[in-house]
Image: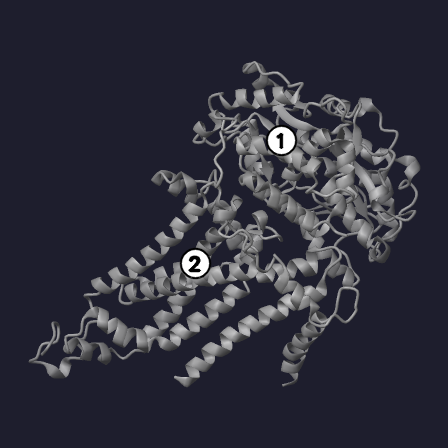
Amino acid sequence: MLLILLFVAYPVFATIGVSLFSSDGKFAGLANYGEVLGSPDTVNLNGFPKPPPFGTLIHSAIWIGIHLPLSLFLGLWLALVLRNVKGASWVKTAIFIGMVTPLIIGGILMLYIYDGSIGIVPKFFGALGIQGLAVGWMQRPTTLLFGLIFGSVWLWTGFSLIVYSAGLTTIPKDYWEAAQVDGTSTFRMFTRVTFPLLKPMTIVVITMTILWELKIFDLVIGATSPQGGVGGAADVLALQMYRYAFVEIPARRGVAAAVATFLSILTMVATVSTIRYMVKR
Amino acid sequence: MAGPGTPASEPGKASENYRPPSARGRLIAIIAALLIITNVVTGLSAFYLAQPTVSAAALCPGSAGAAKAPAATVVTTSLGTDSSSSQFTFHIDPPFKPTAATVTVVGPWAGPEAEPFLRVLENFTRLTGTPVTYKNIRQEDLTQILPTQFASGTAPGDVIFMVSSFIKANGPAHMLKLTGNVSDAKYTPGSLDPVKVGTDNYGGVYTGKIKPGFWYRKSFFAAHNLTVPTTFQEFKDLVVKISKISGIRTPIVSGDGVGWPLSDVTEHFIATYGGAAMHRALMNKTKAWTAPDVRAIFADRLVPLLAGKCFSEPLEWNTVALTNWWGGLHALYFMGSWITGLVSNATDLGVFSLPAESGITRGIVFAGDYFFVPKYTANPTEANQLAEWLAGNEGQDYQVKQGGHIATALGVPLSDYPAVDRGVAQLMNGVQILSDLDDTIGGTFQTTFWSQLQLLWVSPNQLDSVLAAIQAKVPA
């Protein structure tokens, strides 16, 4: 309890405290929160439809909207496909390497993968004749955010693969056998047997992935800059917080703390709601 | 009743004989289809978003056709130190047992850029007997490292090279006042202004580099019968002519990294066509980036070249961009005078500034390499000794002799400069010397300036939003 108070409760309340003061130490109330939510750094939809930047909050939503289903379904699909394949553990290990690669390295890898001159992705689209995508993805606001999201799918899929692979081993084979005996189709077997029984794993994957997406930082700064790349097109909440605290001269620690608190609230909402859902079931 | 693979005659062995559903084809197909659809939808979104919203007639039409020219493979540098790492440490000991404490120098130079500076430090050690350790840390990283270390009463080195805006902002709280050689009387006028707080110097300035203009290979110009332009129209004609040369990707290569090479080009356009006065007004924050005359420099001079594909997309400045330019995929490269130390044959280098226009007093940016001694140094005597030596003409003379640097200390003879640097120095005749704009303002303005210029380079039609975003980050 003492450790929790010291290392969890105190930093949380200290951060909230800092967020209520301006940079010159005067009490600011909720002004820092207003500044964050009203800032074009956070939400910037002026002139929409337009290419990014849309602001860190929208970028995080886009990140979740694309990255979550892709990494979840890809991991599930690979877990199903590799279930009874000889040598699957080697394949799973290879896929899981992305998960254990430091994300800052992952970010630097993105620079090369998407480089307009030597990157494999632009070369691939160039070979397909899609010249609009045969360009440096990291140099364009239209492709930067999507490039990082797709790259992060590669890095994160190992997590859902391992969780689902573990989940599949817990399902008694009798269930499938009974369904098979009843002549159930493979699709119905998946929707009525496999997927429902994997629900706890799905909740874990969804919760952890959303948390990961909300706090993503190192991948973005590794691939771009403290500003979130060209025009701030890949700016995210954690980077915004870091920039306010450590790049700006003078530092705006109150506003940075407000971003940190806001980020904590978002992650708490995601975590609590999924855990409540899990417990209710 | 019984399904395939579960013989009705052996019901008791059903579990043992169970095979996981083997006919998963439909399931896999559905999931694969979902993945494909998701990817295609997202890919198409990215594709359509990637289309330029404004189509402009390409000023440099030949460039697009040469987009598939092979990457250059010319190695332009010879390295004595490990350049594969962006961060390295180098230790120098005197040839006898040292009695003085080791001074740790933190500087931004790595690879071939660091070699001449290491020779300067070797000379210091040889003359004074003080051992020196050189650590390479990028100034962008120091921006984040130093405030944290200062807060805990420490610093990563005894003499640290850092941008002037940071020294000015943190000097009184965390840095030692410098005296001796670090005084106005021993420098070219104004050199110490960016690191002064009141009358106190919290930093010194080592050598500097000027950012004179566009570099080219004399052999390339001679082979293609190209001449240095004397008017802006001639400059445009030159890039159009270059774009039609076989094998050229774009006439001008755009160096990039975190964004500063683009800011250097932009500052050159401002200092040439807005003049030194406009450059200083922007730096002093007395003129807005959205002002009509500032916007006109961008809209009339720079944006047409960007929209016309005369500049390449931003490429890593000292690897891809440098190699491609030297290898003949591009003809012009805007870079500072340190480029003379990065190529294999500096005698083949030529440089020209953007052509002047009558009635405008031009300026050229001179970027000094500023350093400071942190209050938290454990070796203040040795650190000050090195700082004074670097600030004086003796230390700087070693550096300028090796090329690429211009002395800030008085008393370094012009005859000590390599021929190419003397040529560079001549470009400074008749123009006003300016400080680097974004280094001087620093902070989030600098990073925003860089990222917005990266945006302008690939989306020149977004000029107004770019200028507005830059202006929004100008500190009060």
* Residue at the (60%, 36%) spot, across then down: B255
Q: Secondary structure at mark 1?
A: helix
- Residue A34 seen from this side: yes
Instruction: State which quarter of the image contains the N terminus of chain A.
Output: bottom right
Q: Nearer the viewer, residue A266 or B163?
A: A266
Q: Nearer the viewer, residue B372 or B315?
A: B315
Coordinates of residue A50 in the picture (x, y in percent) = 50, 49
Q: Nearer the viewer, residue B382 or A137?
A: A137
Q: Amino acid at mark 1?
A: Asp
Tag of residue B300: 1
Coordinates of residue A18 in the picture (x, y in percent) = 72, 71
Q: Chain of mark 2?
A: A
The correct choice, above or below, for B416 with respect to B394 in the image is above
Coordinates of residue B165 in the picture (x, y in percent) = 78, 48
Left or right side of A127 for B383 = right
Residue A74 quadrant? bottom left
Coordinates of residue B360 in the picture (x, y in percent) = 76, 26
